[in-house]
Image (cartoon, helix red, strand yellow):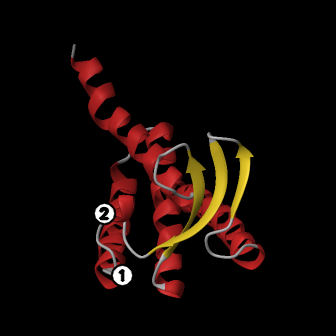
Amino acid sequence: MKNNKRFLIYGFAILLLIIDLIVKLFLKNNMELGDEIILIPNLFSIYYVENSGAAFSILQNKTIFLIIVSLFCLVFLDRMIVSSNSKLENISISLIIGGLFGNLVDRMLYSRVIDYISIMEFPVFNLADSFIVIGVIIFIYCNIIKKDDVKE
C-alpha cells in the first residue's frame, strides 16, 4: 500500500511538473523577456519575467542555496508520505512536490525561475508557485486546523 500511495503522489506531482514545464517552454519559445499579454486590463496578464531569487525576489542570485533548500524540502516531503493519513494530505504533498520540481528544474537549467502570471499589483509568479502555495494551505489545514477541530 505504501508503494502504491507513493506512486500516486509522485504520479500526480509529475503531471503537475509536466504542465508547468510545457507552459514555461511555450512562453520561453514564443515571448521575449519582458513581453506582456494583457488578458483582463488592470487585473490579469501573462508577463514573461525571470527571477533569480525566491518568492518576492528575495535571495537574488542564491541559486545553489535555493537548490539545496528545495532538495531538503523534497526529502522531508518524501518522508511525510509514509505518515500521511488522508487523501487530502496526499494531494497537498503532491502539489508541493510538483511545484518544487517545477522551480527546481528552472533553477538547474537556467539559474532562475520563469514567472508569468501577473495579477494586479501582486508580484509575478508561475504555476509551480501556485501549486506550492495551494499545497501548503491544504497541508496546514490537514495538520493543524483539522486536528484542532478533532480535539474539541
Distance from the alpha carbon under mark 1 to that under mark 2: 20 Å
Read off the residue under disc 1.
Answer: 63
State the residue in front, 141 or 38.
38
Mark 2, Cα crowd under 10 Å, few <14 / some 14-19 / many 20+, is: few
Residue at x 33% of width, y 38% of height: 140
Query: Furthest-front residue in view?
Result: 42
Mark 1, Cα crowd under 10 Å, few <14 / some 14-19 / many 20+, is: many
Which numbered marker is on residue 111? none
Residue at x 37% of width, y 65% of height: 57
In the rendered image, residue 152, in percent from the top left (x then y), is placed at: 22, 13
Can you tell which of label 1 and label 2 is closer to the viewer? 1
Looking at the rendering, which quadrant does residue 8 occupy?
bottom right
In the rendered image, residue 93, in percent from the top left (x then y), is placed at: 44, 52
In the rendered image, residue 85, in percent from the top left (x then y), is placed at: 39, 41
Q: Is residue 97 above or below residue 43?
A: below
- Relative placement, left or right, of 144 versus 54 is left
- Relative placement, left or right, of 102 versus 67 is right
Residue at x 36% of width, y 78% of height: 67
In the rendered image, residue 137, in percent from the top left (x then y), is placed at: 40, 39
Amino acid type for the residue under numbered disc 1: Thr
Give the total of numbered labels.
2
Residue at x 53% of width, y 86% of height: 109
Read off the residue under disc 2.
Answer: 76
State the residue in front, 141 or 26.
26
Q: Is residue 77 above or below residue 87?
A: below
Look at the numbered disc 1 and give the secondary structure of its residue. Answer: helix
Looking at the rendering, which quadrant does residue 4 occupy?
bottom right
Point out the tag, 1 or 2, that comes first from the N-terminus: 1
Query: Furthest-right residue in view?
Result: 30
User: Mark 1 and 2 residues: CB-CB less than 8 Å, in contact?
Assistant: no
State the residue in front, 38 or 4.
38
For the question of whether residue 85 can be seen, the reply is no
